[in-house]
Image: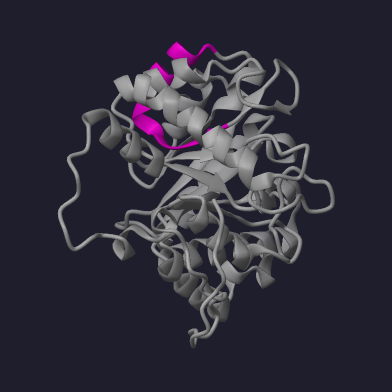
Amino acid sequence: MGINTPRSKPQPPGSVTEPVLPAEARPRRAWIPDQPWPAATEAAAARLQARDRIGFMQGRLSPPVDGQIQAFPWATWREEFLLARVHGFRVMEWTLDAARLRENPLLTAPGRAEIRQLSADHGLTVASVTGDFFMQAPFFRVEGWTRQARLDDLARTVEACLEMAIPHLVLPLVDNGRIDDPCTEDLVAATLTRLQARYRGTAFTLLFESDFTPDALADFLARFPATGFGVNLDIGNSAALGHAPGPEVATLAPLIRNVHVKDRRRNGHTVPLGTGAADIPAVLAGLRAAGYDGNLILQTARAVDGDDAGVLVHYRDMVCDWLVTA
């Protein structure tokens, strides 16, 4: 899908240059025609509805940063709004790293204003945030003022999400952030329950992504208040751990608020969709049967040929096909 020569016209502060886009790439509010739409088939309407639920992890429309599979794209984060619009994405999950966390646009007032403007310009919703900083620099691995500083950063992140009306913050309890003993579990549960005072009564939720078994994760969530906490289901991580999709979805369905879509080999790394251990169609069918209608965020393998947008669109089409036939 090409882009024509840009028009010259004034732009609001913080906006990228507005190109002349083909009609299908414009924000939906901008391409509602004056005349009635042709009758759409039920299948086409279902596919469009499904596609709008499939978002992407920030950075997947940019070249990898220092060879990492996932990192905040400092050089290109603004351009990703335009690229998302061009390729028909409506939903993004923001990423927050421990490095330069307080400089991240989401955590600064000018940055939040720019995110709002870019979101409005390009019809893109930031619907969730993945807090990789929580895994990279977990508060429960340190003590004293360092612990307090990390908790302050977590509180700042919650406040930023509330200000931006972002409903979900994913806290990865994996790798360096995994909970590996009862004392750590007690500390995390008590600390995050206290944190809920900042957002109690709102639609905001903290979502846990963990390497617990499904039953253990459900038991962990039972330690928290009934509202304000939930599960981010990572399809690839579950496959790598050997979780059977049917029982896992059945156990966690009432708690699932967000889904990461990727594929991994058993006990291995992320691989292209459909080439690993994940039975993605089975997971999507289970989620549909359970009534899940939330977002599906592509946290997929990176392009090997530099065509980051092309591979992401290909993965979206795969998931869309699986979703409408689930």
* Residue in the foreground of this view, choosing between 102 and 144: 102
Q: Position of residue 83 (x, y in %)?
A: 57, 57
Measured as percent of width and height from the top left, residue 171 is found at 57, 45
User: Which quadrant would residue 196 be assigned to in this image?
Assistant: bottom left
Image x and y of residue 318, in percent: 51, 28
**177 horizontally vs 25: left or right:** right
Vertical placement of residue 124 versus 60, above or below: below
Can residue 30 be seen here? The reply is: yes
Identified at 70% across, 44% down, the residue is: 307
Residue at position x 59%, y 18% in the image: 278
How is the rendered protein coloured? one colour
As for residue 176 lying within the magenta part, the answer is no
How many numbered badges does the structure rendering display?
0
Which range of residues does the magenta coloring cover? 244-261
Q: Would you place residue 116 above or below residue 227 in this image?
A: below
- Hey, which quadrant is residue 304 in on the image? top right
Residue 258 included in the magenta stretch of the image: yes
